[in-house]
Image (tube, rainbow, N blue to C red):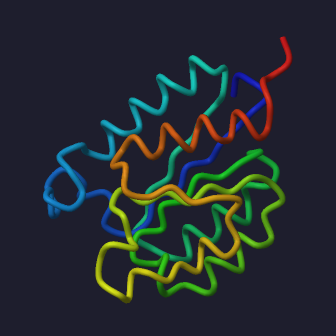
Amino acid sequence: MPGDIRILILNGPNLNLLGTREPGVYGLQTLSDIEDAVRRRAGELSMAVEFLQSNHEGELIDAIQNAGDQANALIVNAGGLTHTSVALADALRAFDGVIVEVHLSNIHAREPFRHHSHVAAVATGSICGFGGHGYILAIEAIHSIVGSPSP
């Protein structure tokens, strides 16, 4: 991967349905649209990104456990697992790098069960409510935290 900053972007359950699932909440952008925008911005910043979307908690945990050798940072939109998965939070806790939690909607302005995030407790920071642009904000935050790649 080009660049000294390598980011693994993990998307959890149902995010493969973006663009068609509750567009009033999640917008019309597809996950592919978001990935394309992130690739463009990451390229401008000389950062490398890799994406994984899974509807399976164990697959996401495996990816986090294997990320230490492959990534300096993680961007995590765990979907519904945000509010339920202690196991996912435990895996993130073991990652030695920057972790940015991203949510398309403002989880704090939604149903009460969405207000608690197990991911936020272990993340460097959280971004929510900015739709797909939240991923771009996360890329830029990681760039600021980790630093510009050496020439």
Above or below for 36 versus 101: above
Residue 67, percent across and down?
72, 55
In this view, which residue lies farthest toward the front?
Answer: 109
In-image side of 81 versus 146 (left or right): left
Q: In this image, 137 relative to 129: left or right? A: right
Q: Residue at x 15, y 63 (%)?
A: 22
What residue is shown at x 48% (from left), y 61% (from top)?
A: 77
- Residue 139 lies in what quarter of the image? top right
Q: Quadrant of residue 37?
A: top left
Q: Quadrant of the C terminus?
A: top right
The percent coordinates of residue 31 (x first, y second) are 32, 46
**Number of dots carrying numbers:** 0
Viewport quadrant of the N terminus = top right
**Horizontal placement of 114 versus 68: left or right?**
left
The one nearer the camera, 92 or 102, is 102
Q: Which residue is at 42% across, 60% downward?
A: 103
Q: Position of residue 138 (x, y in %)?
A: 56, 44
